[in-house]
Image (cartoon, rainbow, N blue to C red):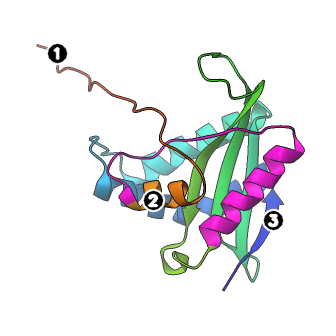
Amino acid sequence: MSARIVAAGEERLVELRELYLSLHHAELAVSTLALTEPDERAWAARLRTYRHHFAAGRARLLLAEDDGRPVGYALGLVSEAHDDTFVLGARVGELYTLVVAPDRRGRGVGAQLLAALDEVLAAEGVTSLRVEVMVGNADARRFYRRHGLVEGEVVLYRYPRPSA
């Protein structure tokens, strides 16, 4: 069963808490990083980040709705290209967050959201898309490959060293 995809503004962000936390929990389960933020702190930080992107005019929010309630969302960003190492175009799209409610996964909602984001970006003349995926998230990596994305780089992290 498909969902209805709608464009939304910053005012709908508060409705996304439970969806985001389902993503947060999934990332905790697969990540090779030491993700330890408790739910409320993780959501508060993500909400601040989303609001920052809206304030900068970069955010594009799409909701997958069922009876008016979000069952998934994609938050995309648009920015000017700052690195000519990769020829991605003058403006670059980034899928910052894609999440579907656990009980709706595997039903095409994620594909609907990704396709809708592609349409929004194309209407703005953005032809490239960047997506970051946790190394341990094999399901997400397969999903994006099925939708034409290719793995292009790996980001490495160093944890803060404990002070002596």
Task: Name the disc covering residue 3, or none.
Answer: none
Q: How crowded is mark 2: few (under 14 residues within 10 Å), some or many (20 or more)?
A: few
Nearer to us of marks 1 and 3 is 3
Residue 154 position by quadrant = top left
Mark 3 Cα shell of 10 Å, populated few (<14), some (14-19), many (≥20): some
* Front in this rendered view, residue 128 or 12: 128
Query: Which corner quadrant holds the C terminus?
Result: top left
Measure the alpha-carbon separation of dots 2 and 1: 40 Å
Which of the two discs, 3 and 2, labels the residue nearer the N terminus? 3
Label disc, if present, on residue 142 of the rendered structure:
2
Kind of residue sitting beneath label 3? Val
Mark on residue 6? Answer: 3
Q: In this view, does 163 lie above or below 59?
A: above
Q: Distance between the residues labelled 3 and 2?
A: 25 Å
In the picture as drawn, the residue positioned furthest to the right comes out as 123
Left or right placement of residue 103 versus residue 87 in this view:
left
As for residue 132 lying within the magenta part, the answer is: yes
Give the percent coordinates (x, y) of residue 100.
56, 68
Q: Residue at x 41, y 62 (%)?
A: 139
Q: Position of residue 64 (x, y in %)?
A: 70, 69
Residue labelled with disc 1: 163
